[in-house]
Image (cartoon, rainbow, N blue to C red):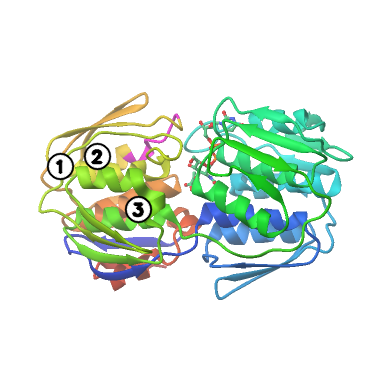
Amino acid sequence: MDKIEITGGLKLRGEVAISGAKNAVLPIMTAAILSSGENIIKNVPHLRDVMTMGKLLAHLGCGFHLENNRILLKTKKITSMDAPYDFVKTMRASVLVLGPLVARTGHARVSLPGGCAIGARPINLHIIGLERMGAKITLSEGYIEVKAKRLRGATIYFDIPTVTGTENLMMAAALAEGATVLENAACEPEVTDLANALISMGAKIHGAGTSVIKINGVNRLKPLNYTVIPDRIETATFIAAAAITQGDIRIKKCRPEHLEAVISKMREAGVKITPKNDRLTVRGPERLSSVDIKTMPYPGFPTDMQAQFMAMMAVADGTSIITENIFENRFMHVAEMSRMGADIQAEGSTATVKGVKSLNGAPVMATDLRASASLVVAGLAAKGTTVIDRVYHLDRGYERIEEKLKMLGANVRRIK
Ligand code: EPU
């Protein structure tokens, strides 16, 4: 299993380009199921999750080819309606085939995802929504089976705004009979990007990016030719990496407007950030100041950036209260950061982070993607060497992270 070794203490300098957004490309790949033909998706990051989704789509009968950040997906024939446990347990986003499969074929059988490292993460709201659209749902042997000759439009209220739930139902509704209204829908930029991809296929969707989305079902959709948005969490992770190392970097090919909460909190912590079109310049202060954050659905502070921000707060001046409101178990990085000398007390959904003068390198490992990223950020600032185990978590969501950091002057290498 690969490891990443970082010797901390170097200030990041230079320029980095952001890759396409993982959480946009995954649903857009499944949207291809709604058409019959050759789909092209551009600005695709080379990530383990993208490969897993490609394999799942190939299992369903699609042709999948990824080269030079471009995917070709052939969806003329769908030969299986099954998303087996092996895929879903590797990647929860596999449930995103549910909506498009039922809409296209009238049938889907998808393994129920179990709990995950960051929380229970049920998919009850996806299922209730499909039921409201007239689908017959059965549960057996750990699989959820959904059948509907043709889905019917419905008004669906989400108790909690759910990103993949909103995406699943938006895709299902795109080919349903009549109008669907999704209320208290997720507003994340990745939801809007999926809506734009669907609109480019001929779907009739209004209001994506707000909490009420209206979809008028159509009979057919044409194949995709679409470029995905830049990854806002990768962007924010590089901001954190520059901030914690007193760095001075330029980030290109990003969308600063998707990061208002993060930029605002970074500035409060003393980071100088100047956005200009699709670029950002970031300058870290001599010493960061402690600020409190609370994770919230978009446009609030993203849960996917909580761990990396905590790494910054671990060496900031003062005490920071970090509240995780989205997932009940997303403090797995606390114990690892403590091994690096951080002073953090986590209780329930709150972590109290007392900034220390400096962190010390240590062997660490993490159980999820963003926790791993936070240990990279911490390692960049720590004295000595940090070795991060289980790099496959990072490879799920960050394209060539060690190469990009090396280009910025970090002392980092991958140990095979
Ligand atoms: N929830 C329910 N019932 C449901 C669906 C969600 O109770 O049917 C709850 C969840 O348990 C959670 C909250 O609603 O407490 C929000 O979860 P959401 O459904 O929005 O999360 P998700 O769609 O499973 C996506 C991202 C995550 C990101 C979250 C929150 C993808 C593929 N995944 O997950 O990304 O953390 O939204 O923004 O888009 C990551 O990239 O590292 C990652 C975990």
Q: Is residue 184 left or right of residue 343?
A: right
Q: Position of residue 95 (x, y in %)?
A: 66, 44
Give the mark nearest the N terminus, 3 or 1: 3
Report the span colored magenta: 328-333
Q: Amino acid at mark 1?
A: Ser
Q: Nearer the viewer, mark 2 or mark 1?
A: 1
Local secondary structure at mark 2:
helix
Residue shown at the point (67%, 55%) measured from the top left: 199
The CA span between labels 3 and 1 is 18 Å
Quick one: label 3, few (<14), some, or many (20+) residues within 10 Å? many
* Residue at image point 85% right, 57% down: 79
Residue 330 within the magenta-colored segment of the rendering: yes
Q: Secondary structure at mark 3?
A: helix
Q: According to the image, label 1 marks what residue?
A: 289
Q: On the image, numbered disc 3 is attached to which residue?
A: 236
Q: Is mark 1 within 8 Å of ligand 1?
A: no
On the rendered structure, is 270 left or right of 345? left
Q: Amino acid at mark 2?
A: Ser
State the mark number for residue 338.
2
Query: Quadrant of the rendered structure where residue 408 is?
Result: bottom left
Towards the viewer: 58 or 198: 198
Image position, residue 55 (x, y; %): 68, 60
For badge 3, the amino acid type reads: Ala
Q: Is residue 346 left or right of residue 88?
A: left
Q: Is residue 196 magenta?
A: no
